[in-house]
Amino acid sequence: MCKEKSRILAQLGDPVGNRRFHRWILGGAAALSLLSVVTTFANTARTTDVYLPAQSILVQVSQPAPTTSSNDGLHFSREERIRPGDTISSIVRRLGIDDSKAEAFLRTDTVARTLQSKLKAGQMVSARFDERGELHTLQFPIPGSDRAVNIERNGSELKARESDLSLETRTLTRVGTIRSSLFAAADEIDLPDSVAIQLAEIFGGEIDFHTDLRRGDRFVVVYESLAYSGREVKPGRVLAAEFDNAGTTYQAIWYDGQPGSGGYYTPEGRSLKKAFLRSPLEFSRVSSGFSMRLHPIHGDWRAHKGVDYAAPIGTSVRATADGHVEFLGQQRGYGNFIILRHHDRYSTAYGHLNSFASGIRQGSRVAQGDVIGYVGRTGWATGPHLHYEFRIANVHQDPLSVALPINHALSGYGLDDFRLTAQPMLTRFEMMNGIKTAKLD
Ligand SMILES: [Zn+2]
């Protein structure tokens, strides 16, 4: 079979085709472990990819092969990666297409012409053509979207249209270690930002990702990835995650027993949602690099009763719990200030805001995580930061020492059903931790 493919490509006069046919990803020597991982999860009808940064893995990535069609002669399918400086013409030539009519069409057609501005190095382009090099179909995925421009031949006519890419859902597992920040750890293992942010959200009731992370903290994350032609187009939802923070291990598994009521649960079936988020700051790449818990910097404002978070002006400030706006306006020292009231006895306060979120006013109801304003330096502040207070029955408390669980737990059929979802994820955690141990041996 391989021999035959090589021969066909050789006939097309493509000296590199043979190399491209078997594209191997060289990761680093646990081929057997990887195979066992793949085998274990093969019955989920999804492809599985496990990232093991410091070990050798050989994974064969399937490439479209030349295909023959009994209806209209011999057809070939080819893929090419866009290189810096490419034009539509240079890509078309590299694909092996020799079709002046198609080239003219690509230059003049209204839809096809827009492609030149959308070319992005690294993106894959695929084509089907016949043995004479005449183009039949050409597909350009549009960068940053799940759409594609398709050029199709119908008889002697060529047409260009936009359509959805047919995406394949894969389940990926990544292991990371914190050395400086969550995003630095994510970058090391090619974890998309949106997945790192989901991690911070999932464990947001337990861990303040701005202040609590420690060097050596470790995580395993299992998430969906939508791929086109073996390449990730966009990451999807985190299905399960484990986070070791300062010696404590937290585990979360996504469960959506009834549509629309999905959430993350511990392996015992308890909801991870807490009455209060640990951090009022929205976690982002920018705020994560900036934010440190500050010592009080208010000079003569002696009775400092809150926590100060340094953050860039404009960083989103979130309601840490469901509640309503008790006060919104200016107050001496606090500048632009919001007080939220939650469940009668509790209140939270947010000071030095640059501005309030639109639509938020006195009396407004807010849900946990809603953006209520933006970090600033109004009032007595020497630099941009958020002043955050937590009060129980109007007595100030250290927000970082208060943990208030919501006692929502699965039971009965829901719990049994959840366990079916949870078990494969727990196996995955064990496997990833086992691989780490093996590596150390
Ligand atoms: Zn303060």
Image (cartoon, rainbow, N blue to C red):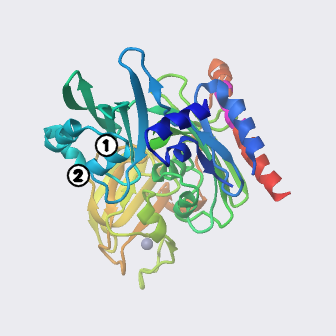
Point out residue 431 in the picture as x, y percentages from the top left corner: 75, 42
Hey, what amino acid is under mark 1? Ile
User: In this picture, which residue range is highlighted in magenta?
Assistant: 420-427
Above or below residue 331? Residue 264 is above
Q: Is residue 48 visible?
A: yes
Point out residue 165 in the picture as x, y percentages from the top left corner: 36, 33
Q: In percent of the image, x 37 and y 43: which residue is there?
A: 95
Q: In percent of the image, x 65 and y 38: which residue is there?
A: 266
Q: In percent of the image, x 36 and y 78: which residue is there?
A: 383
Name the residue beneath numbered marker 2: 117
Name the residue beneath numbered marker 1: 142
- In front: 194, or 387? 194
Above or below residue 75? Residue 215 is below
State how far apart marks 2 and 1 are (Cα): 10 Å
Hey, what amino acid is under mark 2? Ser
Above or below residue 255? Residue 289 is below
- Let me know if residue 421 is in the magenta part: yes
The image quarter containing residue 212 is bottom right
The image quarter containing residue 71 is top left
Q: Residues within 10 Å of mark 2 (few under 14, many from 20)?
A: few
Q: Secondary structure at mark 1?
A: loop
Quadrant of ligand 1: it is bottom left
Left or right of 113 on screen, residue 233: right
Left or right of 255 on screen, residue 57: right
Left or right of 219 on screen, residue 382: left
The image quarter containing residue 159 is top left
Furthest toward the top, the residue is 71
The C terminus: image quadrant: bottom right
Furthest toward the right, the residue is 441
Point out residue 217 in the picture as x, y percentages from the top left corner: 67, 60
